[in-house]
Image (spheres, grey):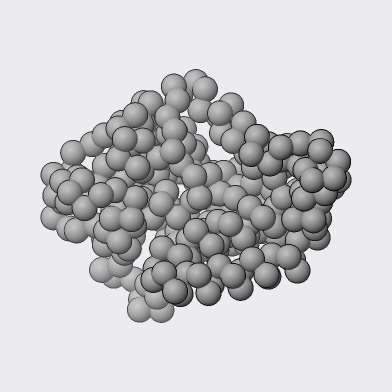
C-alpha cells in the first residue's frame, strides 16, 4: 500500500511494523493543530494497511513529543474561529485517545526523548511503552499555570498510583526512563542506542502470536478496567465466544491439537506453530 505524505507526520514501514513519527523536530514535536489532523488521518491509514501488523508511535529527532504546541494550539485558540477550534480539538482527542485506544493492532510508544504534558495521552493510550534511559518525562502544566487537562490527569491516574500522580502533576518534577518504569508509565527502559532494536524485538514477538487473540486480549484488558466482577465475567465469556468466530486461524483448536494430540509444544512455554501469519 502506498505511503501517504504529511506535513507534520512521517510514516515508515518495514518488517510488518508501521512507524508513525511525529515530525516537527525543530519544535521538539510539539503538537500543532496540523499535526493533530495529520496524525488522525495517518492512523486510519495504518489501521487498515495490510503491510502493518504492529504500530510504533515515536518522535523525530531528540524528542518524543513536547506536549501541545503552546503557541499554535493554546495561544492560537484565543483567535481561532469556533469551527477551526472544534475541528482541531476533535482531531487532537481522536488520535491521542479514541483511535489509539481502539487500534486493531498492537501499539508501542517508543519514547526516545522529551515527553511532556499532552504527550501523556498517546503514551498511555498505546498498549506498551518503551523508554530511553535518557528520556525526560514531565507533567509540566503546573509550571505555566494550567492543570493537566484534556484527559491527561485521567490517563495518569491509570498508569501511576494516586500519590505519584499528585506529586508529579503538582511539582512538575521531571523523571527519566528508568523512573518511568518504576512508576508504571513505561514497560521497559533501555539506553537510547538500543531502544529501536528493542522495540523491533517486541514488535516481532507480538507478530508471532495469533493476531485475533492478541487483539481480543488487549481489548478485554482495556474494557474490564471499568467493570465490576459480574460485568467482567459476562463480558469476558461473550468476548471469548466472539474470538472463536473471528479467529481465522482457529488458534484455540490448533493450539489444543498441537499440545494434546501432537504433543509438539507446551502452551506454558511458547506459542503453537502457526500455519499462516495473517488474521
Ligand atoms: N509549544 C510550542 N513550542 C515549543 C514547545 C511547545 N510545547 N516545545 C518546544 N517548543 C519550541 C521552542 O519554543 C523552540 O522554538 P524556537 O526555536 O522557535 O524558539 C523550539 O521548540 C525548540 O525548543 P527549545 O526550548 O529551544 O529546546 P530544548 O531542547 O532546549 O528544550 C523542552 C526542550 C521540551 C524542554 C522545552 O522546549 C520545553 O520546555 N517545552 C515545553 C514543554 C511543555 O511544557 N509542554 C507541555 C505543554 S502543555
**How many callouts does the rendering have?**
0
**Looking at the image, can residue 114 be seen?**
no
Residue 22 rendering spot, x and y as whole percentages: 49, 46
Nearer to us in this view, 22 or 153: 153
Residue located farthest toward the front when viewing the structure as drawn: 260
Residue 200, quarter of the rendered image: top right
Query: Is the residue 9 above or below the residue 100 in the image?
Result: above
User: Relative to residue 209, is residue 251 depicted above or below?
Assistant: below
Residue 76 in the image, given as x and y percentages of width and height: 31, 63
Position of the C terminus by quadrant: bottom right
215 or 17, which is in the foreground? 215
> Image quarter for residue 202?
top right
232 to 125, vertically: above or below: below
Q: Position of residue 10 (x, y in %)?
A: 58, 45
Q: Residue at x 50, y 70 (%)?
A: 233
The residue sitting at 39% across, 33% down in the picture is 113
Q: Toward the viewer: 251 or 107?
A: 251
Identify the residue shown where x is 82% and y is 49%: 257
Residue at the far bottom: name it. 83
Would residue 123 appear left or right of 117 to someone viewing this image?
right
Q: Find residue 181 and report its horizontal and vertical position in percent.
A: 36, 35
The residue under the point 79% across, 45% down is: 260
Q: Is residue 265 visible?
A: yes
* Left or right position of 162 against 97: left
Amino acid at each position: 500500500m502506498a505511503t501517504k505524505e504529511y506535513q507534520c507526520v512521517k510514516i515508515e514501514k518495514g518488517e510488518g511494523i508501521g512507524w508513525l513519527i511525529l515530525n516537527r523536530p525543530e519544535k521538539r514535536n510539539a503538537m500543532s493543530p496540523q499535526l493533530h489532523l495529520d496524525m488522525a488521518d495517518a492512523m486510519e491509514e495504518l489501521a487498515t494497511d495490510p503491510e502493518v501488523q504492529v504500530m510504533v508511535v515515536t518522535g523525530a529527532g531528540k524528542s518524543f513529543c513536547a506536549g501541545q504546541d503552546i503557541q499554535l494550539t493554546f495561544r492560537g485558540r484565543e483567535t481561532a474561529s469556533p469551527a477551526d477550534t472544534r475541528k482541531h480539538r476533535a482531531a487532537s482527542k481522536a488520535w491521542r485517545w479514541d483511535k489509539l485506544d481502539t487500534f486493531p493492532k498492537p501499539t508501542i510508544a517508543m519514547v526516545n526523548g522529551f515527553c511532556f504534558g499532552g504527550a501523556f495521552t498517546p503514551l498511555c493510550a498505546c498498549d506498551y511503552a518503551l523508554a530511553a534511559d535518557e528520556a525526560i518525562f514531565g507533567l509540566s502544566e503546573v509550571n505555566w499555570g494550567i492543570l493537566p487537562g484534556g484527559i491527561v490527569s485521567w490517563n495518569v491516574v491509570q498508569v501511576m498510583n494516586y500519590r505519584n500522580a499528585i506529586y508529579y502533576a503538582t511539582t512538575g518534577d521531571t523523571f527519566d526512563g528508568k523512573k518511568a518504569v518504576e512508576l508504571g508509565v513505561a514497560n521497559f527502559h533501555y539506553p537510547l542506542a538500543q531502544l529501536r532494536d528493542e522495540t523491533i524485538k517486541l514488535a516481532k514477538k507480538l507478530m508471532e502470536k495469533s493476531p485475533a487473540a492478541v487483539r481480543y486480549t488487549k481489548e478485554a484488558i482495556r474494557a474490564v478496567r471499568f467493570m465490576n466482577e459480574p460485568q467482567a465475567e459476562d463480558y469476558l465469556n461473550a468476548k471469548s465466544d466472539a474470538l472463536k468466530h473471528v479467529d481465522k486461524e482457529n488458534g484455540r483448536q490448533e493450539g489444543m491439537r498441537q499440545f494434546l494430540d501432537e504433543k509438539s509444544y507446551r502452551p506454558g512455554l511458547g506459542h503453537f506453530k502457526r500455519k499462516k501469519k495473517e488474521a
